[in-house]
Image: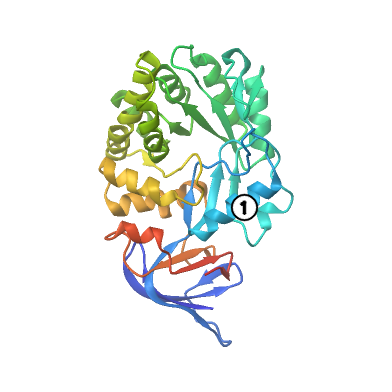
Amino acid sequence: MRVVGTLLPSGERTQFWILGDRITFEKPLNATETVVDGGFLTPGLVDVHTHPGHDDDATFTEKQFREECMAHVAAGTTAIRVPGHNGPIPPGARDDPDLPRLVTAGRFLAYEALQTGHPIHTPTVDLVAAAVAEARANDGWCKLIADWAFDVPAVPLDLLARVVDAVHAAGFRVAMHCQTAEGTRNAVLSGADSIEHGCYLSDDLIETLAARGGAYVPTGAAFQRSVPEVRTKPDGPRKTNWLNGAEGLFRSAAVAHEAGVTVLAGTDSAPFGNVFTEVEFLIAAGLSPATALGAACWTARDFLGLPGLVEGGLADLVAYDADPRVEPGILRHPRHIILRGRKIR
């Protein structure tokens, strides 16, 4: 299959060919069919923080997992990182031609003493052993809950640091949930590879994160969707803390990017296939449209080790009628989607 268009982020007019699940810029000898002729071409989009597959009771089912993953694909999201899921990934899902490429992190590991009470969390006494086991059983990632309620002490820094050290020693990486000031500080100082949400991410913590090449996934659009409802709640410390934390995500995303932190796009929750909303959040936070798009595309793919539209790269791409770096709204309207070398649209 032959693809013609303007390649992003370079902006070069180009053509390449799809051979199986790979692309090449060398014209093959056999006959080809042009499947994309014009438009702006991006590698397939990436949602680095999404949790498909859970019903209202937090039960993980294959049917719901497939449906929500396919919603991602229909929007041009051809790869997802699932930092926490409450059940085994269905057999064959990683190679299913209809589903996005998967990077999973196993169960949400919550230190038992934290007592989150959330049905999707896995209470764990031995965080160190559990984290290494989950990373090994998945795609080299594990997911820890560093805090929960603002008025409950976060997981101690020394424990989180031991977990991170053990996971790193085994050659794996750690994603860490944090929404309170204490939890965010402990998560960053522990050495976590990606900070998820990161409310109250102060400038000194951003500098620390940048110095070690860490990543930040604010999931800001998910918080903003909840703001109107939270504002209707009775006034009190819990409400104030949550609203201040959500508002601070705008500044944290901008400052983190300027400091050199890898800022990535993750949606956290339903509806699935809406990573463009996080791109819009990052633009509203002050990132350029090209940088915000990269957070859900080429930058995210580099972070996860997924080759983009380069020689021998993965045959995942999206074509748009307009340049999404100039008209970000076009991300809601992909013209063509190719996943694993198959034209979906």
Q: Does the image show residue 213?
A: no
Residue 132 at x, y = what percent? 65, 30
Q: Which image quadrant for residue 263?
A: top left
Residue 272 at x, y = what percent? 51, 48
Foreground of the two, 135 or 288: 288
Q: Residues within 10 Å of mark 1 (few under 14, many from 20)?
A: some
Q: Which residue is mark 1?
A: 67
Q: Does the image show residue 342?
A: yes
Q: Answer left or right for 30 relative to 226.
A: right
Q: Answer left or right for 292 relative to 296.
A: left
Q: Secondary structure at mark 1?
A: helix
Residue lying at the far right of the rendered structure:
91
Q: How many marks?
A: 1
Residue drawn 51% across the image and 22% down it: 146
Foreground of the two, 269 or 125: 269
Task: Name the residue type under label 1.
Answer: Glu
Q: How is the image coloured?
A: rainbow
In this view, 191 is above or below 268 = above
